Amino acid sequence: MSEPSRPRADSTPPGMAFERPIRELESQLAELEELSKRTNLDISEEVSGLRTRLAEEIASAYADLTPWERVNVARHQDRPTVSDYIERAFDESFELHGDKVFGEDRAIVCSLARIGEQRFLVLGNRKGRTTKERMSYNFGCAHPEGYRKALRKMKLAEKLGLPIVSLINTPGAYPGIGAEERGQATAIAENILAMFSIRTPILVIVVGEGGSGGALGIGIGDRVLMLEYSYYSVISPEGCAAILWKDAERTPDAATALKLTAPDLRELKLIDGVIPEPPGGAHRNPAAALAEMRRAIARELEALQKIPTDELLALRRRKYRRAGEIPGRFPVLD
């Protein structure tokens, strides 16, 4: 794994004004380090002091983020993508293609992968980094053929006795006319239904954006985890604000109302756990984020594979029957 790199000065997306003091300190630190390399001046104490201030500023800024600020961190362009996790956190991977009906959807990646001796199928939403890649991957918004491809590969994993790891990072399924003509809603619904009956462990991890049915189409699992600064929601904050208030300026209010952050969803018992990110988010130290993801996947798969298959399926169905239950008011009958 490569060493973490300091984010580019122009890499902060709109909505991350809270990082301005951090970027200023990073710029000062870079200047001091460059000066130290170019001269014989002993400024080690100044560099050390500035590093301490930077660490403190990062901890302070990220200690109490608003939901909207967390959404912007989840969308940061330097945040590790699904492709990064597959290529750099796993020991081996081999991509599988096609839905055998229409074609290849590059927004969904499906690969046979390995961590140590643990083999599994990994699937996820592929976004890309460059403009060319993002257009090729449709910005992570899958078409029906992407969901059909994912389902075919999940059934292959079931046949081979391999667990499944689903990495979610999408603003939502593609809403275009062509996708609707080819059965977008049906493809997502069929995936959701089928994943309840697939007889192999399924681990779901939201690594960035978890938007609407686009996420749920590969999001039914025995364990559902979120990275600390990811979000998971029935609709984007922008979409919610447009529908409820017809006012883009209410987007931060929508983010708060939607309860879309990892801590909120953990408290509501809609997810099973939160994977911690490096101080300042995964975009600030990708190597540490990749290592933590690797450990989490290995740990969770080991635990899930110890559960007998029939019990696993019963627990999976029970888990979703109880989703959104309000104790004492609207109990769910098993």
Image: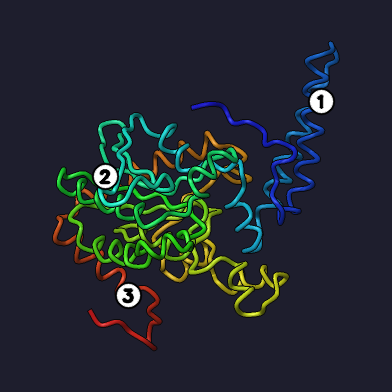
Where residue 312 appears, as percent x and y from the top left, is 20, 59
17 left or right of 213?
A: right
Task: Check residue 32 in the rendering and tell me which mark sits there, or answer none.
Answer: 1
299 left or right of 334?
A: right
N-terminal label among 2 and 1: 1
Residue at 41% in and 60% down: 179
How many residues crowd around disc 3 within 10 Å: few (fewer than 14), some, or many (20 or more)?
some
Instruction: Check disc 3 and give the amino acid type.
Output: Arg
Q: Nearer the viewer, residue 210 or 174?
A: 174
Q: Tell me the SS state at disc 1.
A: helix
Q: Can you tell which of label 2 and label 3 is closer to the viewer?
A: 3
74 left or right of 251?
A: left
N-terminal label among 2 and 3: 2
How many residues crowd around disc 2 within 10 Å: few (fewer than 14), some, or many (20 or more)?
some
Is 93 placed above or below 328 here? above
Q: CA distance from mark 2 to mark 3?
A: 25 Å
N-terminal label among 3 and 1: 1
Q: Residue furthest bottom?
A: 329
Q: Which residue is mark 3?
A: 322
Q: Which residue is mark 2?
A: 302
Where residue 61 appears, as percent x and y from the top left, is 71, 52
Q: Residue furthest top?
A: 40
Q: CA distance from mark 2 to mark 1?
A: 46 Å
Identify the image quadrant of residue 186: bottom left
